Image: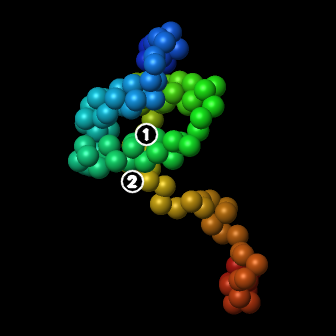
């Protein structure tokens, strides 16, 4: 099994600002990832998708959780570069999660469903 060099490097290095360092590493590899997976997004659009993921976790202040997220980020980057992901996985990251409810959750009827919707599901 291939060794995850970026994750190991992140674990061993004592960074003062690990989150910006991870962001820079991802942005640096972004054009290569877009080429490898044949994704027709401009780099600024893909960068905005990555930035939104970082901003979603900007409220976290616990150092242990931040360390875990940074290490997970390096592992995700390394796995992406090693082709462990598929194109739809990356498209979901760059385009954002359009459908929060997927699979069986999408088919569930709510409490406010009409009799026609209930009959159509039966």
Decide which of tag 2 and tag 1 comes sooner along the chain: 1
Residue 67 shown left or right of residue 115 in the figure: left
- The relative height of residue 14 versus residue 38 in the rendered view (above or below) is above
Residue for point 72% across, 75% down: 110
Q: Is residue 4 visible?
A: no
C-alpha gap between disc 2 and disc 1: 15 Å
Q: Which residue corresponds to mark 2?
A: 95
Residue 64, picture quadrant: top right
Residue 114: percent from left, percent from top: 71, 88
Nearest the viewer among 18 and 105 is 18
Q: Which residue corresponds to mark 1?
A: 86
Residue 81: percent from left, percent from top: 38, 27
Tell me if mark 1 has few (under 14), some (14-19) or many (20+) residues whose alpha carbon lies within 10 angstroms of its own. few
> Any mark on residue 77, and which?
none
- The relative height of residue 26 versus residue 41 in the rendered view (above or below) is above
Nearest the viewer among 17 and 57 is 17
- Foreground mark, 2 or 1, reads 2
């Amino acid at each position: 099994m291939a060794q995850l060099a970026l994750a190991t490097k992140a674990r061993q290095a004592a960074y003062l600002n690990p989150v910006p360092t991870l962001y820079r590493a991802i942005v640096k590899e972004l054009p290569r990832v877009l080429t490898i997976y044949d994704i027709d997004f401009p780099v600024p659009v893909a960068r905005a998708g990555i930035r939104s993921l970082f901003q979603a976790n900007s409220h976290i202040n616990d150092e242990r959780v931040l360390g875990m997220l940074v290490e997970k980020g390096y592992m995700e980057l390394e796995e992406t570069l090693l082709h462990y992901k598929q194109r739809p996985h990356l498209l979901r990251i760059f385009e954002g999660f359009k459908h929060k409810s997927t699979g069986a959750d999408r088919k569930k009827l709510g409490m406010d469903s009409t009799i026609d919707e209930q009959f159509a599901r039966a």
